[in-house]
């Protein structure tokens, strides 16, 4: 799945769960999520990989 962006992969996994798709497909998505060291969270809790969150500030890495 090298052509799928991180965000799209996470959205695909969320949608696959919602649609109750086949567990083998979910396992493939989850393996890729773990391979990329992505974090599963609620949609509003997601933080892009290029940001660091502090309790008071968010810094964009350059």
Image (spheres, rainbow, N blue to C red):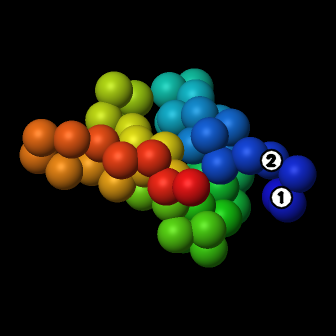
Mark 1 burial class by Cα count in 10 Å: few <14, some 14-19, many 20+: few
Residue 14 visible in image:
yes
Q: Which numbered tag is attached to residue 1? A: 1
- Residue 21: which quarter of the image? top right
Residue 10 position, x and y percent, is 57, 43
In the rendered view, does 57 fall on the left or right side of 21? left
Badge 2 element: loop
Quadrant containing the N terminus is bottom right
Residue 27 visible in image:
no
Residue found at x 65% / y 55% = 29
Badge 1 element: loop
Residue matched to label 2: 4
Residue found at x 36% / y 47% = 59
Tell me whether circle 2 and circle 1 mark residues in contact (CB < 8 Å).
Answer: yes
Q: Is residue 53 above or below residue 27?
A: above
Residue 14 position, x and y percent, is 52, 35
- Residue 41: which quarter of the image? top left
Quadrant containing the C terminus is bottom right
**Closer to the camera in the image, 19 or 56:** 56
Residue found at x 68% / y 37% = 8
Residue found at x 50% / y 27% = 18
Q: Which numbered tag is attached to residue 37? A: none
């Amino acid at each position: 799945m090298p052509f799928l962006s991180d965000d799209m992969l996470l959205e695909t996994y969320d949608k696959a769960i919602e649609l109750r798709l086949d567990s083998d497909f979910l396992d493939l998505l989850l393996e890729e999520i773990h391979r990329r060291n992505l974090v599963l969270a609620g949609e509003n809790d997601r933080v892009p990989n290029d940001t660091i969150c502090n309790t008071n500030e968010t810094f964009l890495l350059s």
